[in-house]
Image: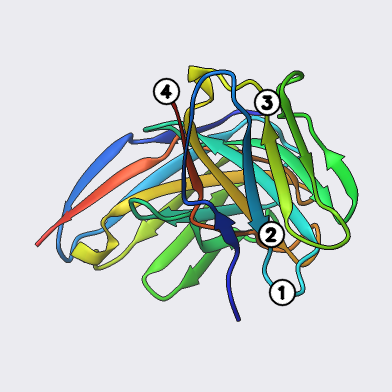
Amino acid sequence: QQQVKQSPQSLIVQKGGISIINCAYENTAFDYFPWYQQFPGKGPALLIAIRPDVSEKKEGRFTISFNKSAKQFSLHIMDSQPGDSATYFCAASLDGQNFVFGPGTRLSVLP
Amino acid sequence: NAGVMQNPRHLVRRRGQEARLRCSPMKGHSHVYWYRQLPEEGLKFMVYLQKENIIDESGMPKERFSAEFPKEGPSILRIQQVVRGDSAAYFCASSPSRNQPQHFGDGTRLSIL
């Protein structure tokens, strides 16, 4: 009930391509869905987040698509760059508590 | 405006010793969260504290682990009688209130010999 599934585990994309990472959750009470980017040796950094009252949110090259009925949400990185190479985590929380993280996707963007 | 500060960055302990991990939240943040991350895995929630109070400790092991966030000073995650399985990266995050985004520190990497 508290699990967040994430796929793929790893992703290789050519520079300029679109990176897509998918997450699925079980608890329909979750009301906040952030994405974090983590570089080696660093803490996760908040990238973009969405609440279930909207189906899409875009910030620069990053877009979250949210499908409430399917209990799925995804991160799209447009025009992927080598500097985007990092591990990406989706997460879900209820009322600002009980943050549950996905296992992560290691993205490599080839120059 | 300094971010979330964690120290030490690396901590080595022998089995049976105590480990103390410190976290100073961002200025103006009174909510602190601790997470554990094993290699190649996501973050696992451990405990959520607000000044002087533990709000949610559902992710904390029942024994050997404790956390506090005193009125003055940093939040402390304490692990007593450490075992090899405690080796991990421990991250602290803070937020100004419960429903606001969390900002993470760069973690403490704990190694148990």
Q: CA distance from mark 4 to mark 3?
A: 15 Å
Residue at x 26%, y 58% (from the top left corner)? A18
Indicate the chain on which mark 1 is placed: B
Residue linked to disc 4: B113
Of label 4 and label 3, which has the lower sequence position?
3
What percent of the width, then of the height, locates residue A22?
Answer: 43, 42
Residue at x 81%, y 48% (from the top left corner)? B49
What percent of the width, then of the height, locates residue A97?
Answer: 77, 45
What percent of the width, then of the height, locates residue B43?
Answer: 54, 38
Q: What label does residue B94 carry, if any?
A: 2
Q: Are marks 3 and 1 on the same chain?
A: yes
Q: Is residue A79 left or right of residue A31?
A: left
Which one is closest to the eye, mark 3 or mark 1? 3
Indicate the chain on which mark 2 is placed: B
Which one is closest to the eye, mark 1 or mark 4? 4
Of label 3 and label 2, which has the lower sequence position?
3
**Neighbour class for label 3 at 10 Å: few (<14), some, many (≥20)?**
some
* Residue type for callout 4: Leu
Q: CA distance from mark 2 to mark 1?
A: 9 Å
Q: CA distance from mark 1 to mark 4?
A: 35 Å
Q: Are marks 4 and 3 on the same chain?
A: yes
* Residue type for callout 1: Lys
Residue linked to disc 3: B80
Residue linked to disc 1: B27
